[in-house]
Image (cartoon, grey):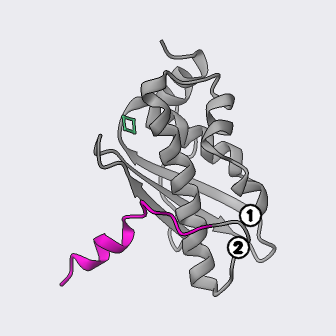
Amino acid sequence: MYSEKVMDHFQNPRNMGEIENASGVGTVGNAKCGDIMRIFLDIDENGIIQDVKFKTFGCGAAVATSSMATELVKGKNIQEALQVTNKAVMEALDGLPPVKVHCSLLAEEAIHAALWDYAEKNGIKIEGLEKPKTDISEEEEEEDY
Ligand code: FES
């Protein structure tokens, strides 16, 4: 049911981990399945994504899509990273079963959330980027109350 590429990225995930003092961090979740994905971006002064890592607490397809998404944005500039949609991630993985499409959406949203965080930290606006709806990092911060 899964392509070889999905199995490969699930069993040997690329760029798993975290980046300390990342330029941008995005955490998104899917309320229905409860899976959570976090992406860390290290962006240099020219707006190039030098490094990217992910942490995913979720299903195998979520791990595979996070892994592929990080591979696709690494070394790219911000506008190019915005083009890495869930469709692009799915194509790069040779497809996903229909019930697993939402897992790839999580990857797209996590990248957008991390870029949004980067933009906010630097007081810039990224053309074409909208505030991610499922960014749950703000809720986490509120837990301190
Ligand atoms: Fe929800 Fe895969 S089942 S992210």
Which residue is at a point 60% across and 23% down the rendered structure image?
Answer: 95
Q: Are marks 2 and 1 in contact (CB under 8 Å)?
A: yes
Report the disc number at residue 115: none
- The residue where tag 2 is placed is 126
Task: Name the residue carrying label 1.
Answer: 78
Find out whether residue 49 is within the magenta segment. no
Q: What type of secondary structure mainly makes up the magenta span? A: loop
Range shown magenta: 130-145
Question: Crowding near pointer 2: few (<14 within 10 Å), some, many (20+)?
Answer: some
The amino acid type of the residue labelled 2 equals Ile
Between 113 and 23, which is closer to the camera in this rendering? Answer: 113
Badge 2 or badge 1: first in the primary sequence: 1
Q: Secondary structure at mark 1?
A: helix
Q: Position of residue 32 (x, y in %)?
A: 29, 43
Instruction: Tell me: residue 43, above or below residue 134.
Output: below
The mark lying in front, picked from 2 and 1, is 2
Find ligand 1 in the image and state its quadrant: top left
Give amino acid for label 1: Ile
Quick one: SS at disc 2? loop
The front one of 32 and 144 is: 32
Q: Where is residue 86 shown, x and y percent of the image?
A: 60, 41
Side of 98 where 142 appears, left or right: left
